[in-house]
Amino acid sequence: MTIGALGALVRQAPRVPSHQDLRRQYWPNDRDREPFMEQSVRHAVTTIRERFGEPLTLDDLAQSVMLSKYHFLRVFSRVTGVTPGRFLSAVRLQEAKRLLLSTSLNVAEVSVQVGYSSTGSFTRRFTESVGLCPTQYRKLSLASRSQTRRTPLSQETTAACLPVPQAWSTGSVTGVVRATGAELQTTYVGAFDGAILQGVPASWSNACASGRFTLARIPTGMWYIHAVAQGKNSGGGAGPEPLLMATVGPVQVARGTGHLFDITLSPMDWTRPPILSALTGIDLQPTAA
C-alpha cells in the first residue's frame, strides 16, 4: 500500500467509531508528542546507519521503536522526507561508495558488505543512484582525489549521462541560493526525480558568485530541486568543511513556463539521507546519526 493510499484510508477512520481510539493514539494532533515522534525516528535512523548490512525490514524498524508499521512509515516519511526503505538503500550505497574508495574490495565483496545478496542487483542500483557504475566511480573519484581540491566531474562526463529532452516539452527553473552566516564555495543545483539527491539530474548548473542559477530545458513533469555546497570554516579553522544543502519540491514543471525560487542552504543533519549522485563532486558525508 502506498503512503498516499494509506493516508486516505486513515483520514476515513473518524467515520468508524471503533477506529477513533486508534486514531487518537497514532495520529495525535497536539504538539506534546512531537518530541517523542522525532526521537523514535532518530532511533530508527541510528539503527539503519549501524545495521545497514543486515536484512532490515519495515517491521524490524517499527518494532525497534514500538510503533505500528503504518504509523511508523508515516512519521518517518514526514520527518526525513523519504520512506525507511529508501533511507536504508541510500545509507547502503553511501557505505558502498566509501568502501570503493578506501579499500581494495572488489564489487562483489562490496555488495555483500552493504547487505546485497546479488551483485547484479547492487550494480544496477548503484549505477542508477550514483550516476556511474561501481568501477567507473572508483576510477574517476580516485583520479579526482589526486587533485588539490575535489571538483565536480567534467562537463563532458556529465553531459554523456544527461537525457536530451525535446525543446518543445521543457520548462525552466531560476532562482538564488543563499546560506545565512556561511561563506560558500561552488554551489551545485540540479533537478532530480526524487527527494534523495541521487542519479542523473534532468538539468544542472553551478550557481554564480551572487548565488543566481538557471536550470534550463527541464522536461515537463514533477521534479525536486536540490542545492548543495561545501561551506568554508569560519576563521580559517582546520576542522571539516560544513556540507550545506536544501531541497525544494516536488515542483510541477510545465511546458514553456519558468519558476523562480529563493533557496536557503542549511547544514545537513541526521534527518537527511546521504547524497548519492557522483555528479556533484561532493565529498563523502559521515554516516553517523
Image: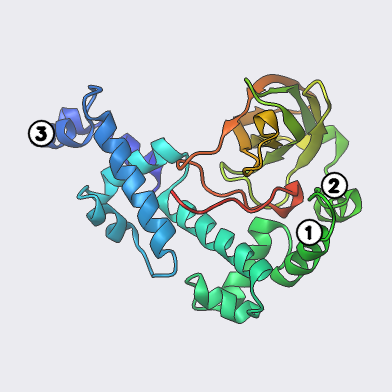
Q: Residues within 10 Å of mark 2 (few under 14, many from 20)?
A: few
Say which element carries label 1: helix
Give the residue at mark 3. 21
- Residue 251: x, y in percent? 62, 29
The answer to whether 108 appears left or right of 253 in the picture is left
Q: What residue do we see at 74% from left, 46% from top?
A: 280
The residue at the far right in this view is 156
Q: What residue do we see at 22% from left, 47% from top?
A: 67
Give the residue at mark 2. 164
249 or 94: nearer the viewer: 94
| 197 to 37, vertically: above or below | below
Say which element carries label 3: helix
Q: Amino acid at mark 2?
A: Val
If you read the primary sequence from the N terminus, does the residue marked by circle 1 or circle 3 appear first? 3
| 239 to 175, vertically: above or below | below
Tell me whether circle 1 and circle 3 mark residues in contact (CB < 8 Å): no
